[in-house]
Amino acid sequence: MQQGMQQGGAAILLRLIERRFGPPSDQVRERISQADPKTLLQWSDRILEAKSLDEVLH
């Protein structure tokens, strides 16, 4: 169940990144796929106000 939620969160975040900043690199995709649910939630919150992908992931 936890893994399914993580995968779903990662998929949604990748979609938001693509819509906002363009297609993410393979490195970004890998980083997101390895992130824990808490980190994915933090990044998802940041994407709403970030001016760059770097702001989202740091």
Image (cartoon, helix red, strand yellow):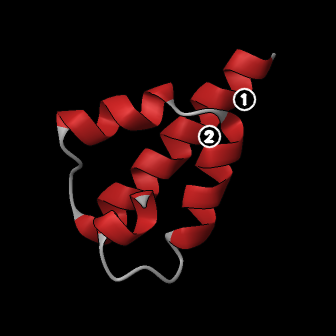
Q: Residue at x 54, y 77 (%)?
A: 48
Side (left or right) of 4 relative to 48: right
Which quadrant does the C terminus fall into?
Answer: bottom left
Q: Which image quadrant for residue 28?
A: top left
State the count of labels.
Answer: 2
Specify the quadrant of the image occupied by residue 45.
Answer: bottom right
Q: Amino acid at mark 2?
A: Gly
Figure quadrant of the N terminus: top right
Q: Is residue 49 left or right of residue 19?
A: right
Q: Quadrant of residue 53?
A: bottom left
Between 55 and 4, the residue placed more toward the observer is 55
Q: At 50% across and 83% down in the image, what residue appears?
A: 49
Q: Is residue 49 left or right of residue 26?
A: right
Residue at disc 2, secondary structure: helix
Which kind of residue does numbered mark 1 sit on? Met
Q: Is residue 33 above or below residue 25?
A: above
Q: Which residue is mark 2?
A: 9
Q: Residues within 10 Å of mark 2 (few under 14, many from 20)?
A: many
> Any mark on residue 25, and which?
none
Q: Disc 2 vs disc 1: Cβ atoms closer than 8 Å?
A: yes
> Which residue is drawn at the image coordinates 44% and 37% (left, top)?
32
As helix, strand or loop, the secondary structure at mark 1 comes to helix
State the image coordinates of residue 3 (x, y, percent, origin top left). 69, 17
**Quick check: 49 above or below 39?**
below
> Rounded to the nearest whole Å, what is the CA distance between mark 2 and mark 1?
6 Å
Q: Residue furthest right?
A: 1
Mark 1, Cα crowd under 10 Å, few <14 / some 14-19 / many 20+, is few
> Who's the residue at 42% across and 57% down the image?
57
Q: Which residue is mark 1?
A: 5
Where is residue 25 drawn, in percent x and y?
18, 43
Work out which residue is located at the far front of the displayed protein and give it.
Answer: 58
